[in-house]
Every structure is written in C-alpha cells, then in structure tokens.
Amino acid sequence: MKARDFDPSKLDVEALAKAGASLDGAWPVAELERLAASTVAGAVPGAVTWRAAGEHRVVRGGEPQVWLHLKADTQVMLECQRCLKPVAADVHAERSFLFVQGESAAAELDADSEDDVLALTRALDLRALVEDELLLELPLVPRHEVCPEPLQTANEEPPVLEEKPNPFAVLASLKRGSLPN
C-alpha cells in the first residue's frame, strides 16, 4: 500500500506498519474542536502540521511489534496568566505508540511499560490522537516572558475609591432618634 491509500480518519495502523509507510499533512486548528476551545476566543486559528510513520519491529522469540511514531506541531493563542492578554504558544508533540491485540493486553502492558501502549484497531482516528497529544503538551500556565502592559505590584497603592456612606449608619441614627447630617 502506498501512503496515499491510507485514510487518517480510519487508519489501519497494522497495514501502515507492515508497509513501513508514513503519512503527513496539516489540519486547521479550528477542525480540532477541543484544541480550538482551549485557545483565546477570536484568535486567528493556525494549522497543525503532523507526521505519522508506521514501523513493523521484529522481536526475537516473539511476534513482530506494530509501532506508530507521531509528530505534531502548531502555534496557538492562549491567555497569559499574569496579564490576561493573548500569548502565542508553540506546541510540539512527539510520541511513539506500541499497538497490541486487545484492550486487556494493552492495559496490562501499559501499566508495566514505559512505552505508550494502545489496542490495535483497523480504524484509528489519527486526528483525534494528534489532538489528544497536543492537548497534553499545552503549557499549564501560559505567560509572556515580559507582559506587554506593566502589572500592578504589591508596593503600589491601589486606586482610591470614592467613600460611600455606610447604609447601616442611617439605621443606627434612626435607632438613636437623630438623623445624620
């Protein structure tokens, strides 16, 4: 099978690995709904560039292993946690996945292995996998190196607010029988 025969929305990972093939492309961030929802509203959406390569790895004394190597890059606008203004964040995900037969085997191996293990399927949604990996790589606390507007420090005096009369002072004066001036 040639790379053009593989559909990223229904990827046969085992066939991709046996062919030693790879896929690459770009998707608008807006098409990755969960990633788009994590960005600043009104920001111009960029694109996610990605590459997926299959590998059929021979193992001594065992069945060959099916691997998928994934790389994805994008830039998104997030909210700076210091000044609350938009900040551009470069997001890069690079991960390899070992695919095994059955959910139970994947869960068992995943618990015992440092590798990411998934159950082999004939119709993997590569777009969802790319989106998951990019979401995991988003910065926890996005912020500018230097915020565009100066921040108020603790030493600065807060702005003086106009003093309003205490509404309970009126009640207290009524109780005493006199009205305040």
Image (spheres, rainbow, N blue to C red):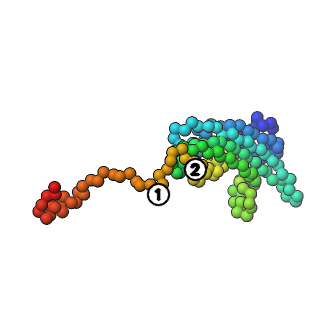
Find the residue positioned furthest to the right.
Answer: 60
Q: Quadrant of residue 24?
A: top right
The numbered disc on residue 142 is 2
Residue 92 percent location from the top left of the image: 68, 47
Query: Label 2 neighbourhood size at 10 Å, few (<14), some (14-19), many (20+)?
Result: some
Q: Amino acid at mark 2?
A: Pro
Q: Is residue 5 left or right of residue 159?
A: right
Residue 102 percent location from the top left of the image: 72, 55
Q: Mark 2, mark 1: which one is toward the viewer?
A: 1
Q: Quadrant of residue 29?
A: top right
Q: Which residue is mark 1?
A: 154
Query: Label 1 neighbourhood size at 10 Å, few (<14), some (14-19), many (20+)?
Result: few
Residue 23 percent location from the top left of the image: 75, 39
Q: Choose between 146 and 92: the one closer to the eye.
A: 146
Q: Choose between 46 and 131: the one closer to the eye.
A: 46
Residue at point 79%, 51% (across, down): 66
Q: Amino acid at mark 1?
A: Ala
Q: Earlier in the sequence, mark 2 or mark 1?
A: 2
The numbered disc on residue 109 is none
